[in-house]
Each structure stands twice: as structure tokens, then as C-alpha cells.
Image: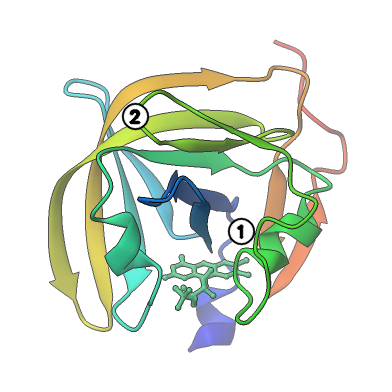
């Protein structure tokens, strides 16, 4: 089933915030969906077994960075155990503790709206407090369990 699911290409996001000590915490999440313009909402699916989500959900704000082409290494790090997930990762935090990765294609500053358990994942609905994007930055693409880049880059508008 993983292989079948993997035929659907997606981007990858980094859900990150500072913890109570000001250190960054975060995880890579490809199960992301734009949900609503009014009110502004996005959603992510997080494994119920995640050890990072219970820490993130306690934070007042969560930063969601849409990873850029070339960010395979930070992406892998943000999914790895027993490593410093932010080693050599350039980031900044917002006033309420959201953490945003430099080099990303887009950013959302979010608050948790609701959480619903669905099978072995939680659907987390996030209210968008702020957002921005970098028009010149292609996104990272995840497809068939591998990282890819858009062959022709971002199309001209
Ligand atoms: C490309 C990629 C996509 C991922 N997508 C998700 C996802 O959509 N949801 C999720 O819960 N974990 C996802 N993960 C796994 C998490 O990043 C992380 O490995 C997992 O939460 C275990 O770490 P934790 O216990 O610190 O949370 C993904 C990992 C990678 C490398």
C-alpha cells in the first residue's frame, strides 16, 4: 500500500517551532493539504506514533515551511532519530515561536484549529495566521519514495 500511495506526487513540509527552552523542534511531513481560503486553513496528517508531534502541539504557534528544491538533506534530518535535526539548517523564528526554514518555497505561520484521529494518523487542521512565498524558489517534490525536482522549474505566470 505504501508503494501505491507513493504514486501520488507531493511536496514536503517542515512543521517546526521552538520548545520551552528556545531550541527548535520539528518534523518532515508530506501529507499536507490546502483546506480553505475563508477561513484560511491547511491540514497535515501526523503519525499517531510521532514523538515530536506531542511536543509541537503544546506550542502556541507552529511554522510550516514548504521545502525547496535542494532541501533533501534537511528533509531527511527532520525525519531522523538520534540526530540534531537542525544541524547546518538555517532557520529563523517568529515572535510566537514558529520556526521557518530558510531556502523554503513558502511558509505558513499556524495555530492548531482541531485534531482528529484517523486510523494510524491524526488529521491536524491548522489556522493560517500568516504566510509568504519565494517566487523564484522551486519546491522539493517527493514521489515513489524519492526526492525529485520539477524538470522545467516554476512555469512563468
Ligand atoms: C519525505 C518524508 C515525508 C514524511 N511525511 C510524513 C507525514 O506526512 N506524516 C508523518 O507523521 N510523518 C512523516 N514523515 C516522518 C516524520 O518526519 C518523522 O520521521 C516521524 O514523525 C518520526 O519522528 P518523531 O518520532 O520525531 O515524530 C515523513 C518523512 C519523510 C522523510
Distance from mark 1 CB to nearest ligand 1 atom below 8 Å:
no
Residue furthest to the top: 157
Are dots 1 and 2 in contact, CB under 8 Å?
Answer: no
Picture residue at 59% right of the left edge, 84% below the top: 3
Residue furthest to the bottom: 1
Q: Tell me how far mark 1 sits from mark 2, CA to CA.
A: 32 Å
Picture residue at 13% right of the left edge, 64% below the top: 116
Q: Quick check: 10 left or right of 48?
A: right
Residue 123, compared with residue 104, is above or below; it is below
Regarding mark 2 in the picture, which secondary structure is present there? loop
Considering depth in this image, is 23 or 136 the residue closer to the camera?
23
Residue 62 screen position, x and y as percent: 36, 42
Q: Crowding near pointer 1: few (<14 within 10 Å), some, many (20+)?
A: some
Residue 12, compared with residue 80, is above or below; it is above
**Closer to viewer: mark 1 or mark 2:** 2
Regarding mark 1 in the picture, which secondary structure is present there? loop
The quadrant where residue 50 appears: bottom left
Residue 29, compared with residue 108, is above or below; it is below
Considering depth in this image, is 34 or 133 the residue closer to the camera?
133
Q: Quick check: 78 left or right of 30?
A: right
Residue 22 screen position, x and y as percent: 46, 45
Label ID, residue 9 = 1
Residue 78 screen position, x and y as percent: 61, 63
Dot 1 or dot 2: first in sequence order is: 1
Q: What residue did someone put label 2 on? A: 96
Amino acid at each position: 500500500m505504501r508503494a501505491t500511495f507513493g504514486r501520488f506526487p507531493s511536496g514536503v513540509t517542515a512543521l517546526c517551532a521552538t520548545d520551552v527552552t528556545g531550541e527548535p523542534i520539528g518534523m518532515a511531513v508530506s501529507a499536507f493539504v490546502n483546506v480553505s481560503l475563508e477561513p484560511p486553513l491547511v491540514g497535515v496528517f501526523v503519525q499517531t506514533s510521532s514523538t515530536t508531534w506531542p511536543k509541537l502541539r503544546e506550542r502556541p504557534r507552529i511554522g510550516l515551511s514548504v521545502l525547496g528544491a535542494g532541501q533533501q538533506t534537511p528533509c531527511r534530518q527532520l525525519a531522523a532519530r538520534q540526530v540534531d535535526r537542525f544541524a547546518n539548517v538555517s532557520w529563523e523564528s517568529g515572535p510566537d515561536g514558529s520556526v521557518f526554514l530558510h531556502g523554503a518555497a513558502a511558509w505558513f505561520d499556524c495555530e492548531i484549529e482541531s485534531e482528529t484521529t484517523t486510523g494510524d494518523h491524526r488529521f491536524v487542521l491548522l489556522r493560517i495566521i500568516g504566510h509568504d512565498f519565494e517566487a523564484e524558489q522551486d519546491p522539493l517534490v517527493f514521489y515513489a519514495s524519492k526526492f525529485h525536482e520539477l524538470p522545467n522549474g516554476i512555469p512563468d505566470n
